[in-house]
């Protein structure tokens, strides 16, 4: 039998019952991630990217198909799959430190209190947010909140890091700064990451592979593109490489030629 | 932002030696020395002393209220100063009810067991207020505990919501005093039936607001709980309770206000003791000035109750 990948999605189909009948969101998705791989999912709105991520997170149960992580079946949410939500999802009544600590308390049960606190601060430091440890999310800017959201996720030391349009709500410059943070973390920690994005440059710059999804209903994987830019990557240097331009071109062509935005097609 | 990776350093060095941008047609605009100087802020004027600043802030807040009160009393005095006015002027209230205004605490004693109101002899207006407050406190406490519990139940379970919500929606529209006959029939005595009346008045806004708080809890918080695999107790204390506390206290605030409204009406009907009875009694004795003093007390105490519950709400929301 073939060796299964670290994270393996096998024939994932998701259907929702609606008034007009069964709506098929995802149709037999097969996707494999190796350990340490950074994979982006890109596609137009409504193509089921988030649903697919939620299936891996265990928040949505697939109608058919199985997700394997480290050869174990995934069928419920768990701390081995940390999620960075688009809306950061920090709890506003806790401080930054307490928010991260809540996650650490559930994942580092072997550590004592002082060690946990150190670990929390270490992770906040990785995203340059240690200075705001005692602030509440309401006092932070959107970019800072998302940094904390990332810190909370990596502090859990998950097997897979799931990011659901992590920078979607941020302005372009803040987004670039956070992409640099993620690249930096990826270089240090070598996480296995599955990220959803709408942004072609973001997908190309950050990923080892870009998975392009067809338009829904019954969305499938349309293209699987390897991005062969050497790591560590830097924004300016990478942009000048021919590999960057090629990958970017391929993704743009997919999104705007092969599978155009369904709403503009209808119009 | 992030610490520069090796490649980034290289690109910077490369950029320093060669023309920075491969794009042709861009003109580099120099940044002059005197512009750098202008980036520094000029020194601030001498800072105001802390107490002076504080005083100004207080004055700015208090002054409008004070002016309004002066205007209100002046207007009232003008309207009611003629000898054949049916309504007493503020000065007349001051003269006729002077004893009541100046000695509110007659018959009230405080010891380590609590506040006691004498059951015989003359009782000051604060005594009547205390009697009423004790009833409100009892009925309201039961309503708060039961209301929050029921609200969480109804908010969490769709079955419980469908079963109970119609009942709540109908019962909450029943005016407090309409419960009095039923309450008297059940309890036979004045004290417990008044407490029941307060309870039945205050519980609906607590239930409905708590339920709404649980129902409208952002899915994001629920997902955080799921991803972190919080157990039901942790989920309740760390996510659901803090997330619904603001809604809960909205309900508790409305509830305490309604209790205070209901207690006065109930005591007016039922008689015996309490601030509601005091109003009815003073009206029957043609002491309209006493009624006016009682009205002001009721308003101030009601205001204080609302602020106290709001204050507790803010404290709880912060520590939860």
Image (cartoon, coloured by chain):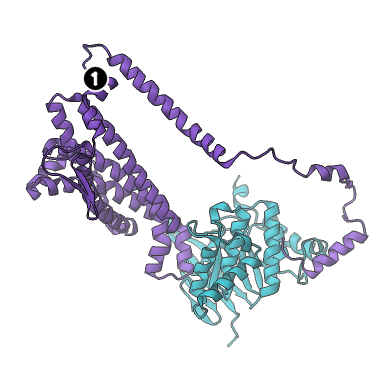
Chain colours: A cyan, B purple
In-image side of A15 versus A44 (left or right):
left
Residue A199 located left or right of residue B105: right
Q: Is residue A13 above or below residue B22?
A: below
Secondary structure at badge 1 equals loop
At which x and y percent is residue A247?
A: 75, 64
Q: Nearer the viewer, residue B26 or B196?
A: B196
Residue B287 horizontal/vertical position (percent): 17, 25
Q: Nearer the viewer, residue B309 or A2?
A: B309
Of residues A52 and A235, the one drawn nearer to the viewer in this rendering: A235
Q: Position of residue B66 (x, y in %)?
A: 42, 28
Query: Up-down: is A256 above or below A69?
Result: above
Name the residue located 31 percent from the left edge and 17 percent from the top edge.
B77
Q: Chain for mark 1?
A: B
Q: In the displayed image of the protein, which residue is found farthest to the bottom? A: A1
In the displayed structure, does residue B138 sit left or right of residue A103? left
Q: Position of residue B93 (x, y in %)?
A: 25, 23
- So how many labels did they put on this image? 1
Q: Residue tagged by mark 1? A: B88
Q: Residues within 10 Å of mark 1 (few under 14, many from 20)?
A: many
Left or right: residue A115 compared with residue A21 = right
Q: Does residue B287 appear anywhere in the picture?
A: yes
The C terminus of chain A: image quadrant: top right
Please name the residue shown 20% across and 41% down the image. B127
Q: Quadrant of residue B1?
A: bottom right
**Residue A207 visible in image:** no
Residue shown at the point (59%, 82%) measured from the top left: A4
Q: Quadrant of residue A235?
A: bottom right
Q: Quadrant of the N terminus of chain A?
A: bottom right
Find the residue positioned furthest to the right: B18
Q: Residue at x 82, y 44 (%)?
A: B37
């Amino acid at each position: 039998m073939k060796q299964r990948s670290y994270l393996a999605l096998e024939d994932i189909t998701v259907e929702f019952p609606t008034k007009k009948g069964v709506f098929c969101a995802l149709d037999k998705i097969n996707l494999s991630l190796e350990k340490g791989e950074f994979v982006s999912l890109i596609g137009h709105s409504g193509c089921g990217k988030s649903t697919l991520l939620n299936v891996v997170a265990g928040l949505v149960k697939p109608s058919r198909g199985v997700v394997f992580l480290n050869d174990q079946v995934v069928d419920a949410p768990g701390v081995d799959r940390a999620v960075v939500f688009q809306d950061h999802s920090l709890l506003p009544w806790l401080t930054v430190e307490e928010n991260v600590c809540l996650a650490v308390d559930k994942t580092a049960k072997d550590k004592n209190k002082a060690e946990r606190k150190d670990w929390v601060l270490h992770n906040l430091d990785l995203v340059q947010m240690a200075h705001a440890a005692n602030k509440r999310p309401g006092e932070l800017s959107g970019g800072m909140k998302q940094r904390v959201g990332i810190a909370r996720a990596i502090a859990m030391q998950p097997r897979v890091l799931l990011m659901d349009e992590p920078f979607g709500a941020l302005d372009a410059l803040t987004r670039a700064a956070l992409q640099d943070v993620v690249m930096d973390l990826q270089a240090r920690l070598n996480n296995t990451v599955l990220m959803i994005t709408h942004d072609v440059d973001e997908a190309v710059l950050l990923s080892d592979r870009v998975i392009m999804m067809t338009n829904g209903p019954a969305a499938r994987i349309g293209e699987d593109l390897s991005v062969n830019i050497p790591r560590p990557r830097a924004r300016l240097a990478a942009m000048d490489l021919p590999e960057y331009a090629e990958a970017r071109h391929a993704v743009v062509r997919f999104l705007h030629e092969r599978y155009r935005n369904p709403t503009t097609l209808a119009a | 932002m992030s610490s520069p990776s090796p490649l980034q350093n290289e690109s910077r060095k490369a950029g320093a030696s060669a023309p920075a941008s491969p794009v042709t047609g861009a003109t580099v605009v120099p940044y002059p020395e005197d512009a750098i100087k202008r980036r520094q802020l000029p020194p601030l004027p001498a800072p105001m002393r802390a107490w002076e600043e504080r005083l100004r802030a207080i004055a700015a807040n208090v002054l409008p209220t004070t002016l309004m009160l002066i205007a209100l009393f002046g207007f009232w005095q003008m309207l009611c100063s003629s000898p054949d006015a049916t309504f007493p002027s503020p000065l007349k209230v001051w003269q006729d009810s002077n004893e009541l205004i100046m000695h509110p605490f007659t018959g009230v004693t405080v010891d380590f067991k609590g506040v006691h109101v004498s059951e015989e002899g003359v009782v000051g207006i604060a005594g009547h207020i205390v009697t009423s407050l004790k009833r409100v406190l009892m009925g309201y406490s039961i309503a708060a505990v039961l209301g929050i519990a029921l609200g969480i139940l109804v908010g969490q379970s769709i079955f419980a919501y469908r079963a109970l919500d119609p009942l709540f929606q109908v019962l909450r529209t029943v005016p407090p005093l309409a419960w009095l006959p039923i309450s008297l029939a059940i309890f036979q005595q004045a004290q417990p039936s008044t407490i029941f009346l307060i309870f039945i008045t205050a519980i609906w806004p607590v239930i409905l607001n708590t339920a709404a708080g649980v129902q409208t809890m952002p899915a994001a918080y629920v997902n955080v709980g799921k991803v972190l695999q919080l157990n039901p107790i942790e989920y309740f204390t760390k996510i659901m309770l803090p997330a619904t506390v603001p809604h809960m206290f909205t309900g508790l605030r409305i509830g305490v206000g309604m209790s205070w409204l209901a207690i006065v009406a109930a005591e007016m009907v039922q008689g015996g003791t309490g601030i509601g009875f005091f109003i009815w009694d003073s009206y029957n004795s043609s002491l309209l000035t006493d009624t006016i003093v009682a009205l002001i007390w009721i308003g101030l105490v009601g205001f204080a109750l609302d602020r106290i519950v709001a204050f507790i709400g803010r404290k709880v929301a912060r520590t939860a």
